Structure formats: structure tokens, C-alpha cells
Image (cartoon, helix red, strand yellow):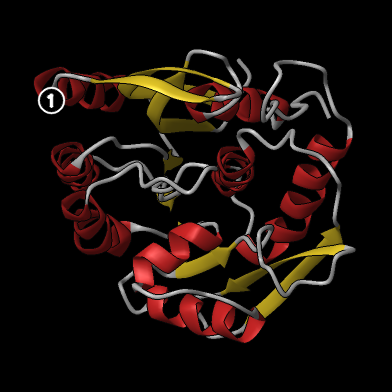
Amino acid sequence: MIEVPQVVTIAGIDSSGGAGVNADLKTFHNQHVYAASIIVGLTAQNTYGVQALAPTDLAFLDEQFKSVAADLSIQAAKTGALFDAEHVVNVATNLKKYAFGKLVVDPVMVAKGGAKLLSDEAIEAVRTKLLPLAFLATPNLAEAAVLVGHEIKNQAEMEAAAYEIQALGTQNVLIKGGHLVDDESTQVSDFILFADGTSRWLRAPRIDTVRTHGTGDTISAYITANLAKGQELKDIIDGAKEFITAAIAQTINVGHGHGPLNHWV
């Protein structure tokens, strides 16, 4: 019998395969962990955008949590798109009920075009119900701005926002700076604030491409997988940055809009 770390993704299905649970499962497979999935909802979407949403019935969502917890030994979990306030509260309630190890929260709130994907009520539920349970939160720049309630225009403001998000209850914060307007054109700079108060910048060459669908899901899934293996976050984060950079750089030709990453890297 081969002992294998077990993880769970709690998010929505991307019908085009590039993001959400689909990206998580591909990343988990790449990192050699066994993945369960709790489906918070379905989407009709493609590389152009999201056309329709169908959240999972709340009672059925409860049953998924119950089934996974009753049989598997989950060492780490991650959340993605949670659709609305009721589903955020449901997920937070179930995560407090079951022992799923370290939790990575990817607070999916803003579409690539800038439109909010969560209502103000749902955003507040993420702040007050979900983030206090998180070992790590991984917002992108737009999501971090929503969480702190103001714009983030430069690297100093990124750093300050990380401390503001940590004050909401999450232990560690990774803010992804791919869309930072004052960033050097040749680099993408992410900022991570650790639970012990230390911090680091993560930098990689900027790649001129629109094929970045599923980036946030993928990097958070990579981190979740390696937390389940027992690694320390400080030892994971450089590999996570290298993985996501390679997955973007080694482009695959799928779709005609914001295409997906290459999860074979």
C-alpha cells in the first residue's frame, strides 16, 4: 500500500477546464497528492468569461463535506469560488466542523475584466467567517483591494494591505501582483507576509501573454499540495512561484481568449 497525502478542493467547476476545481485537480495530480473535491457550484464559462452560474444546493453541499470527512484523511484544503454569502457561510461552518488540516483560501471575488463576482454581503462573509480559519490567503491585487476596501497602487501599498488582511485573522498572506501598474515591466512581483511577521518579495520575469486563466487557482493548489506533504510554507513558496511562471511560459494552444495554463510542467 502506498501512503499518499490527501487534499480537498472546495470550489466550482469550470466547464472549459482551465480554472476552479479543474485547475486544482490538475495541479494536485502534478504534485502527486490524492485529491477529493467538494463542488460548491457549476459554471458555464470559457476563456472569454463566465456565462452562467448554478450554485450547489446547500443541503447537498453539507452531504459532500460529510462524505469526504467520513472516509478520507484530508491533510490540507483549499477554497476557490464560493458564489454567494450563503455558500461562504456554509463552507466556513463545515470547515469548523471537520478536521481538514491547513486551509488555503483563494478569495475569488473579481473577474479578469474587473467585475465583482461576489456581493458585498458575501465579501463580508469571506472577511469575517472564512479568513479567520485560513492558514494562508492568496488574493490577487484586485481581490486584496476588495478585502481592505481601498485601491492598491504600488508595492508599498501591497505590503500594507498584506498586514491589513492578516489582521482579519488569516495567519499568512500572499498578494499576487501581476497587475500592479507601477511594477517594472520586466518583472511580476508578489508579496508574502508570514505568520511570524517576516516577509518576502517573490519576483519572476513578466511574460507577455493573455493565457493566464486559472493562475490563482493553480498557485494556491500547488501550495496546498505541498502543505499536505508536511512542508513548511517558507520552503514551498519559491517552488510555487517557479511552477506558476513555467505553467504560464510554456503556453498551450487552447481557447481564443484568456487561455489556460500548462499543468503538465
Residue 250: where, in percent of width, then height? Answer: 89, 32
Q: Quadrant of residue 69?
A: top left
Q: Amino acid at mark 1?
A: Leu
- Viewport quadrant of the N terminus: top right
Q: 117 or 77, which lies in front?
A: 117
For label 1, the residue is: 58
108 to the left or right of 25: left
Query: Looking at the picture, does residue 194 appear above or below residue 33?
Result: below
Residue lying at 41% horizontally and 20% vertically, measured from the top left: 51
Query: Looking at the picture, does residue 175 appear above or below residue 166?
Result: above
In this orientation, does residue 73 appear?
Answer: no
173 to the left or right of 253: left
- Viewport quadrant of the C terminus: top right
Residue 244: where, in percent of width, then height? Answer: 75, 44
Residue 178: where, in percent of width, then height? Answer: 69, 58
244 to the left or right of 170: right
**SS class, disc 1:** helix
